[in-house]
Amino acid sequence: MSFVEFENVSLRYSEGGPKAIEDVSLQIEEGEFVAVVGPSGCGKSTLMKLISGLKPPSEGYVYVNGRQVGGPLSIVGMAFQAANLLPWRTTLENVMLPMEIVEPYRGQLRARRKEFEEMAREQLKRVGLGGFEDKYPWELSGGMQQRASICRALIHKPRLLMLDEPFGALDAFTREELWCMLRDLWQQQPFTVILVTHDLREAVFLADTVYVMSKRPGRILVKRQIDLPRPRELEVTYTDAFSAHVHVLREAIGRVRES
Amino acid sequence: MKKLSPKTISRLAPWLLTLFVLVCWEAICRGFSIPTYLMPAPSQIYTTGIELAGPIMEHATHTLLTTLAGFAVAVVVGAVLGMIVGSSPVIYKAVYPMLVGFNSVPKVAFVPVLVVWFGIGTVPAILTAFLISFFPVVVNVAAGLSTLEPELEDVLRSLGASRLDILRKVGLPRSMPFFFASLKVAITLAFVGSVMSETVASNVGVGYLMMSASSSMNMPLVFAGLIVIGIMGVIMYELFARLERRLTGWANRGQNAAH
């Protein structure tokens, strides 16, 4: 069985209400980088809620790590478009937040705080935030806040990282910088990524597999393997192979929007 | 003449305005020869105040202690009730109409009831101060708790955080600025409550002092009482404003953010 598996999953947010997603089946392997693209309101975020156990499916089954999802999973880390850092905590304290909640770290926090803080500093350094540990979120730029938010999502060493349009609010140059940061993180420590995005270039640059979803109720229309060689540099986004992938996806999205 | 810096001006402004009002007041009283038993001039109030400084201070101290006692109860009850109300939408819905209804009842109408229950004196004054000042605390703490960003809640819940965890890590720190803002309002209301009750049913306190002074047409003493209450109110307000700035500076980052 795959690491994440959807079997004919549908979800209604209210009893008898419209379906947010319908009959979704997909398999994600451990260590795979998956991107989900689609028009706004297609239920991409719903996928994340299902995987993280925040919502049970109305029909079908969701399996993560070989077990049916029945509640919140601590092997999952999440980050969203808004960095959602707590303004009364420093960057380091923000990154430490999951350690105060997730077992087994939580129980050991008192005894091993120094060690965990060292891990957090390491992580911050890796995303280019070395020296900013003691700054407050409002002293950071948008891109830096998002880096810290991704650090927070990764600090408890989740096996699955879920990102909901994490770079959507950033300018184009910062966004490309963060693509590379995420690429490097993913290549250094093995984890599975599900990236929800509007940006096709982002999806093709980062992902192994791109899924295109339809308008509500969301269904998976296209599954496309991105076979570009790794490690990928930003240069790759100007190649013909890259453009071809983006083009195909763009056409699929275009059909969805017209239908 | 040297130009005053904007900072000095804004520091002097409240004192200058107070002085200006007093001068106008004095001028009007003298210019129109308004009799003292209708409207005493500030100079007369001052003379009376100095003459009777001993008894005024005694009553004022009593009023201050009464107010602080009522305020303390209001803060504790208000914070606890606010937490209960703010942490559950159902309780919020259930409790709100009753709270609003209760707050709409003029507390002066409640004093006779308290007198029947507890007799004339300090206890009804403390209770009136409490009853009139706990409402803003409840409302603010509840508002602070119920304005949690849904995405942040998702992050925490997906990590397996309990309701209590979310309350401790996010809800309470987030509601602190609201809480301290409400203290400033509550302390001034507490003065209203205690003085009101002293006026109706007590034989100590500034309220009682003013009541007995007005029955002997000693208007300068009545006004001296009013001014003493006003001064106590301003001092307490300023105290809590400072406490607020010190403890929740992160919420007011707009004015002094580092650029």
Image (spheres, rainbow, N blue to C red):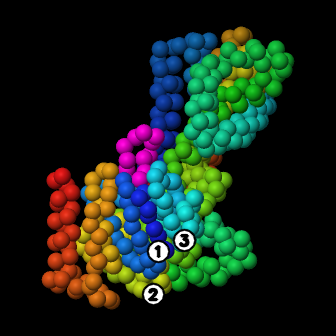
Q: Residues within 10 Å of mark 2 (few under 14, many from 20)?
A: few
Which image quadrant is residue B117 in? Answer: top right
Magenta stretch in the rendered image: A10-21
Q: Nearer the viewer, residue B180 or B174?
A: B174
Residue annotated with mark 3: A66
The answer to which of marks 3 and 2 sits earlier in the sequence is: 3
1 and 2 marks on the same chain: yes
Quadrant of the image containing the N terminus of chain B:
bottom left
Residue annotated with mark 1: A2
Mark 3 lies on a secondary structure that is: loop
The amino acid type found where label 2 is placed reads Gln
The answer to which of marks 1 and 3 sits earlier in the sequence is: 1
The amino acid type found where label 1 is placed reads Ser
Q: Which mark is residue A188?
A: 2
Q: Is residue B156 left or right of residue A15?
A: right
Q: Chain of mark 3?
A: A
Whether residue B208 is visible, yes or no, is: no
Q: Position of residue B169 (x, y in %)?
A: 61, 58
Q: Give me the residue at 28% from left, 79% from top.
A: A226
Which image quadrant is residue B128 in? Answer: top right
Quadrant of the image containing the C terminus of chain B:
bottom left
Q: Nearer the viewer, residue A116 or A193?
A: A193
3 and 2 marks on the same chain: yes
| Image vertical order of residue A202 relative to residue B247, above or below | below
Q: Give me the residue at 47% from left, 20% from top.
A: B28
Mark 1 lies on a secondary structure that is: loop
Q: Give me the residue at 42% from left, 39% from top.
A: A16
